[in-house]
Amino acid sequence: MKKFLVIGNPIEHSLSPRIHNHWIKFNNIDATYDKKKLDISELENLVKQVKEKKIYGINVTVPFKNSIIPFLDKLSNEAEKTQSVNTIFLKDEKTIGHNTDIEGFELAIKNINYNVSGKKILLLGAGGVSPSILVALNNMQAHKIFVSNRTQAKAEKLKKTFSEVEIVEWGTIPDFDMIINATSLGLNVDDNIGLDFSKISSGKLFYDIIYNPSETNFLKSAKKNGNKTENGKKMFIYQAKASFKIWNNIEPIIDEEVMELLN
Ligand code: ATR
């Protein structure tokens, strides 16, 4: 029996087991997928268990996507560029770290038929997920990317890898076609991002990486002001799909039933 895990801290909230176990069952795979709360000191031993084939595959979530890297034999180009790993698998006896968040975001955007090519994008946040969003936006040929983060030094650090971005001060809103909330603001239902969009005309795309709650105040007020909105649910499902494909070499189905697993 194949054993899969998602690791993080905290991990109780993770919906990965629900979605992967659904696909495991649907495809008659002899496997289990569990969640495990870990301490950073346990990462090395866990990767060892992949090498020893005791664990078949691992999803990595907050806060270990970067700290897991020293224990892996090899990184995919995407994981290397973003310094962020969310999927681990064994290939030719080597533990490989991969990043399927990038593909998750790209497929989510394609799914809503939004064309990023030639667009001006404002990315809010310079935390763990931001490098993945930037690679995806570049893959989709964004014309211009602004990054704004409360702590500007972190945005500047990001610019060392992504020299093409322009940093704007937190609170300054340049004209954009699409805005992405990649901060953790909104995870609590009462959170307000506290930015003034009154000078921005309607008809933009407001995207929130957060999917629980399904409509953050950021999306609520954008919708009220005549904008298109999208939460991070599809990104989450598509990153799971890409991980499943890497491990099992099967394209799992995404239908209404799968979407509802996350409600
Ligand atoms: P980390 O910062 O450890 O990588 P993260 O969850 O990946 O953690 O990122 C959190 C993001 O939300 C950061 O961009 C953070 O901004 P700072 O770098 O200034 O901390 C942003 N964030 C969290 N709380 C915020 C708040 N109250 N106002 C503005 N941005 C906030």
Image (cartoon, grey):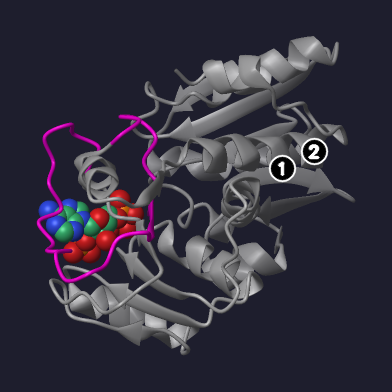
Residue drawn at (47%, 41%) of the image? 61
Q: Are marks 2 and 1 in contact (CB under 8 Å)?
A: yes
Q: Is residue 202 magenta?
A: yes
Q: Position of residue 231 (x, y in %)?
A: 41, 41
Q: Position of residue 226 (x, y in %)?
A: 30, 50
Assess disc 2: are there few (<14), some (14-19) or many (≥20) residues with their C-alpha within 10 Å of its C-alpha: few
Q: Amino acid at mark 2?
A: Lys
Residue in the foreground of this view, choosing between 141 and 222 = 222
The secondary element bearing badge 2 is classed as helix
Residue 212 is labelled as none
Query: Which quarter holds ligand 1?
Result: bottom left
Residue on which disc 1 sits:
242
Distance (Cα) linking label 2 and label 1: 5 Å
Residue on which disc 2 sits:
245
Q: Position of residue 128 (x, y in %)?
A: 39, 57
Could one spot residue 34 in this view of the protein?
Answer: no
The secondary element bearing badge 1 is classed as helix
Could one spot residue 58 in this view of the protein?
Answer: yes
Quarter that holds the C terminus: top left
Residue in the foreground of this view, choosing between 173 and 50 = 173
Q: Which residues, given as a range, are shown in magenta?
A: 186-215
Residue in the foreground of this view, choosing between 255 and 153 = 255
Q: Position of residue 38 (x, y in %)?
A: 42, 32
In this rendering, position of residue 246 left or right of residue 153? right
In this rendering, position of residue 179 left or right of residue 1? left
Instruction: Indicate if the residue with disc 1 has its beta carbon within 8 Å of ligand 1.
Output: no
Residue drawn at (35%, 73%) of the image? 176
Residue drawn at (86%, 11%) of the image? 28
Instruction: Indicate if the residue with disc 2 has its beta carbon within 8 Å of ligand 1.
Output: no
Quarter that holds the N terminus: top right
Q: Amino acid at mark 1?
A: Ala
Residue drawn at (13%, 61%) of the image? 195
